[in-house]
Image (cartoon, coloured by chain):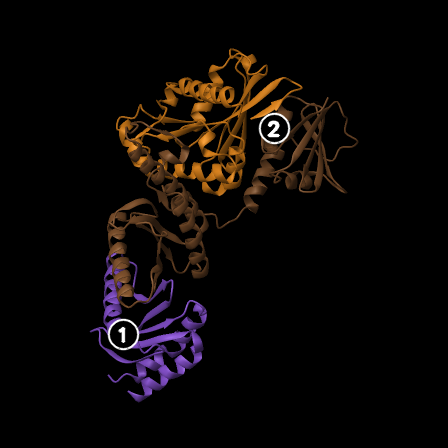
Chain colours: A purple, B brown, C orange
Amino acid sequence: MAKLDDILIDVRNQLGSDFIATDVVGMDGMSIAGSSANPDFNADAASARFAMVMKLATKVATKVKMGEVEDSLVTTDKTYILTRFIGDGSYYWAITVTPEATLGVVRMLMDEYADQIWDAIPH
Amino acid sequence: MAVQGNLSEISLTDLIQLNCQSGMTGRLTVSSRGRTAQVFFDGGVIVHVTQGEKSGQEVFYEILGWDSGVFTLESGILTPTQTINARCSDLLLGGLHQLDEKSNPKEPAPGQLPLPEDVGELFGFEKSNLPETEDLSTEDTMAQNMQEILMELTEEVPGLLAAAVVGMDGLPVADVARGPVNIEQISAQMTLLIKLVETSTEKLDAGTVQDYLLTTDKAYLLLHFLGNTQYFLGMSADRSKTNLGKMRLYNRVFAEKLIAAMPR
Amino acid sequence: MFINRKRKEINIKIVYYGPPLSGKTTNLEYVHRSTPQPQRGDLVALKTRGDRTLFFDYMQLELPPIQGLTPKFNLYTVPGQVAYAASRRLVLQGADGVIFVADSHPNRMQDNLYSLVDLYRNLKNAGTNPRQVSLILQFNKRDLENAASVSAIRQALRVNGYSIPIFEASALRGEGVLETLKASIGAVVNRIQTTGA
């Protein structure tokens, strides 16, 4: 998954000091690539949990007839966690940044790289 | 002796109409935002209107739009000249017509804006079965104020589909919705979602959740915790009609208002 | 409300509001017909594209002066169509009392609700406090064979659980019209005398 890792490193560099973590996760909850600025950050747990959140979000959106989920954003007092579906929706890509990050920039980055990430995933 | 007043007590249209119908002869002077105009009546007929250098019918149409300011009515004063040659009713009609033409064409039809669940409290009516216990009435007031705040929200956010204040038990306390929407179902779903988000972030030590935004191809769904209360504000809006930045801003602003409306 | 101290008059504004064709105009026409000449002004109809905004003067001599001023009632109604939002707001500006005329026909329930919510919005936009307009509800067209029940209309209007003055009427037959107006006048006068507002 070298190409994927390269892309993620690129993104990480562009985010600079705002970067906390990033992950590409299958909807089975398993992460296929990722990195984090904090060695203590439990990436696996994060991946699995957010896969659940994305699944539930999709269910909810269908139930209330809101359309197809594209992305979600969690704001906490310590972080922003942006998650979006990649390609045909069998994977999602998450980026966690500090509250100082400019959301517009992060979203723009995700728009830019989403297709590349999908292409870099073997299928 | 002159009569003075403020346009907040009576609209210019009503004032002019009163003078026409009472057959007044005299001068009505109106000042609004630094501009001053004069309307001359002769036996209840408008004969001259002037503002600065301009006079005539166009000036009349323009001043009808003045909705704030002060006026002075002096009877007996004769007009220096005649620049208007139409009946009062025709002038007022023409004026209202112009105002309607000028007003925002995008103004939504009554059926297009979201509807509140409780209309009675909007007009300040008294509840017919007053509760005995103090607790109950505090909850009632809380729900009432929230309903009003949500109504305000619907005015501010373009493209709003629904908004509700929901408790962590999944039950809506106040809500507004456009069209037939199952508020109970949506509230329950939103609560499930936000609870899962909360547990997940907690376990990851990522901090306390403040809000959650879900973007679909058609809409935005924004869930915002109301301080450290057991409630959150949920808002959904049509993506093609709204601006995300604005929506988040209003979401924050109104969340604060709602928190203030809660009993301590 | 507008006080003309020179003429010692207090001008009170009452507006008839409601969905199109609910009978607002019929109400006014009946009031006009029933009021003896010296006590009423002309019924002035401004024709706007086939719809009508009615303004007229109405003076009731029987009422005692309010704070030394002779009360003069100005009754207005507004066209129901959306296109005239600006003039509707203008008519609601400075309204002291509002009579909401609801249509008892079972197919009009949604129109009734939309109009009532619209009233709230337009009052706010006109700078008039919806909690201070002495709102009276009239359920008109009670003469219809399939007229919705009073409780059904209350439900449709989402005002259940509140104490609200409701008058049943058949404006076409002249029933309930004057009672509604008297109630509106009474509520407004009472409010002015107790709060001075």
Q: Nearer the viewer, residue A68 or B76?
A: A68
Q: Is residue C171 left or right of residue B169?
A: right
Q: Residue furthest front?
A: A40
Task: Say the numbered circle drawn on residue B189.
Answer: none
Labels 1 and 2 in the same subunit: no
Amino acid found under the numbered disc labelled 2: Gln
Quadrant location of the N terminus of chain C?
top right
Q: Position of residue C147 (x, y in %)?
A: 28, 28
Marks 1/2 in contact by CB < 8 Å: the verdict is: no
Residue C197 percent coordinates (x, y):
53, 26
The residue furthest bottom is A2
Residue A42's mark? 1
For residue B41, what is the image quadrant? top right
**Front of the two marks 1 and 2:** 1
Mark 2 belongs to chain = B
Q: Is residue A63 above or below residue B45?
A: below
The local secondary structure at tag 2 comes to: helix
Helix, strand or loop at mark 1: loop
Q: In which quarter of the image is residue C172?
A: top left
Query: Residue lying farthest right?
Result: B80
Q: Position of residue B13 (x, y in %)?
A: 60, 33
| Alpha-carbon span between mark 1 and mark 2 | 75 Å
Depth check: A120 or B59 in front? Answer: A120
Q: Which amino acid does label 1 sit on?
A: Asn
Residue under label 2? B17
